[in-house]
Amino acid sequence: MIWLLACTTSPPTERVMPERPLVPLEAGLLLRRVHLDLAGTLPSLAELEAVRSGQETVDLHVDALLDSERFSSRFQELLAEQWLTQTDRTNITVRELGLDDELQPTLARSVGTEPLALMAEVADQDLAWTETVTADWTMANSLLLELWPLEPVDRSSTGIDDWVPARYTDGRPPAGVAATNGLWWRYSSNPNNYNRSRAAALSRLLLCEDYLLREVSFDAEKLADLDPLVQATKEVESCRSCHVTLDPIAAAFFGFWSFDLYDPIEASRYHPEREHLGRHFLETEPAWFGIPAEDPGALLAELSADPRFASCAVERTARAYWRRAPELHDFETLAVLEQDFLEEGQSMKALIRRVLSTPEYRAGELMDNATPAEDSTRTLRVMSPDQLAATTEQRTGFRWRRSNADPMWNDEHGLRTLAGGVDGIQVSEAQQDPSLSRTLVIKRLAQGAADFVVEHDTANPNEPTLLQAEWLLIGSEDPSFEPALQELALLLWSQTMSPETAVEYAAFFTEIEQASDRQQAWTSLVAALIRDPKFWSY
């Protein structure tokens, strides 16, 4: 982000967010949004009551959630939507590694999580965001510690879900996420590509500048007689416009260059002896936009000082929590956020706190005088597959399992993209609107969760997950039915039902009870409440 200044040498000292024609969300629903975005779960009844009564502020809960155990995993989920590292398949599978076939989903998710876990750890520990590209450490679980040249920093991992700080032992330079196998197994480069795809990925992910979106025009006949790998990139002007900066970046990463993308040893280790090959194959010195850089560590140090790095971090964070891409009318807001981000030492938690305080985040609806540009503001969001899985489990105890994989985390054995998620390869944008496929997934999830929780709470009246024992004994004609229904609405929707809606749900319950029995009526009621848009939107 570039400050446009006139007759001054420094940014203005007082920065004010531009006004927006947006109506703020009601406090209880805003708390629900904050909980879902920072922890992926729903607020408790006590938290809702405290905020709705004015005893506590939403900002107080934001601070608490940023320091909660759930923050790191939820932040990883948001990063995954943009970094696209969590794919179902990797070039190297469990068979090449000598593992059981059933571990493929676990392997793929572990590999894709490594760079995300590193960035989440930087955010969680409130380190400067530059640490994400300069750290001499990474994060690893028990599987990666076993497969890759890694050693834990302070303690060993106890399992797949236990991520601990670790360091590579193969001589790779400190470059944060750009020194992780998890990033480069996703953004691999075949031998003849010479790391150019990796250089382009770094630019897109860390600078928000995509080489592939640049307009390029050339004469095909002139290219016919040139070596496209070397001559064309240096002699054709339209090719040089990209390659003059792209190739020097690619030249710094030949320690990660593999002759065989499917060889686990080749792709798992850094090769210091190959660092000089970039100069040979690309006929250029390693550099970051004209600044010499001998290896990835030096190059990423220059990247962290590039003004575009902080600007991109702000843009990606706003995109994650606004649930949309920033547009031209957001320029002023992003400029204020960026300046605060720099002044606060590039603290990601401080940035998130500020993004969550923007009118764009807290909008509940548009005012009548909203311009067409404001139509992009999301006053209502839909839960991601991760949020759907976490909130359903939180309230009912039910978690889907299919072929040793969570259907919400996987597509080969699951329903991730059908539920609106990304697979990192074919689908690269999370679905932000309701759809038929998402509705069908929610239907099956609701049915499974309702069956599970009613059976559980009937069998365990002293340890209910959702339904109190006395509720299961009453019908819709009982005076205590509506209070129970309203408490269920608060638990699942974080809001009470209107009288008209309560009457409709009571009639629905009665109809099912008369056609079947009371237990089936409660099962159908819970399923209907989960399928209601008030549950899966926020």
Image (tube, rainbow, N blue to C red):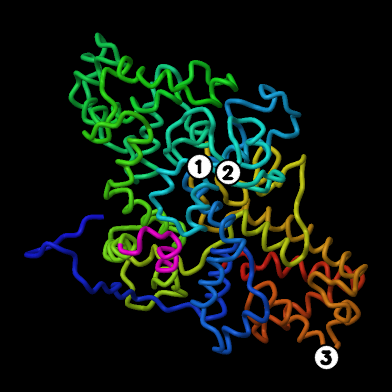
Q: Where does the image place residue 169, in percent across and percent down from the top left? A: 54, 31
Contact between labelled residues 1 and 2, with CB atoms less than 8 Å apart? yes
Q: How many angstroms separate mark 1 from mark 3 (CA)?
A: 61 Å
The answer to which of 534 and 198 lies nearer the viewer is: 198
Name the residue type under label 2.
Val
Earlier along the polypeptide chain: callout 2 or callout 1?
A: 1
Number of dots carrying numbers? 3
Considering the image in quadrants, where does the N terminus appear?
Answer: bottom left
Alpha carbon separation for disc pair 3 and 2? 60 Å
The residue under label 1 is 137
| Figure quadrant of residue 479 | bottom right
Which image quadrant: the C terminus? bottom right
**Disc with the residue nearer the chain's start (3 vs 2):** 2
Q: Residue at x 59, y 55 (%)?
A: 73
Amino acid at pointer 3: Pro
- Please, what secondary structure does the residue beneath circle 3 have? loop
Q: Amino acid at mark 1?
A: Trp
Residue at the image position 52 percent from the left and 47 percent from the top? 118
Q: x, y (%) of residue 178?
A: 44, 37
Label 3 CA crowd tier, 10 Å (few <14, some 14–19, many 20+)? few
Disc number for residue 479 = 3
Q: Which mark is residue 534?
A: none
Q: Is residue 519 above or below residue 275?
A: below
The residue labelled by disc 2 is 153
Span shown in magenta: 343-355
In primary-sequence order, the first of circles 1 and 3 is 1
Residue at 73% x, 56% y is 445
Q: Could you say whether the residue bearing mark 1 is in a helix, strand or loop?
A: loop
Q: Which one is in front, 420 or 194?
A: 194
Q: Is residue 451 magenta?
A: no
Query: Which residue reaches farthest left?
Result: 7
Q: Position of residue 491 (x, y in %)?
A: 70, 75
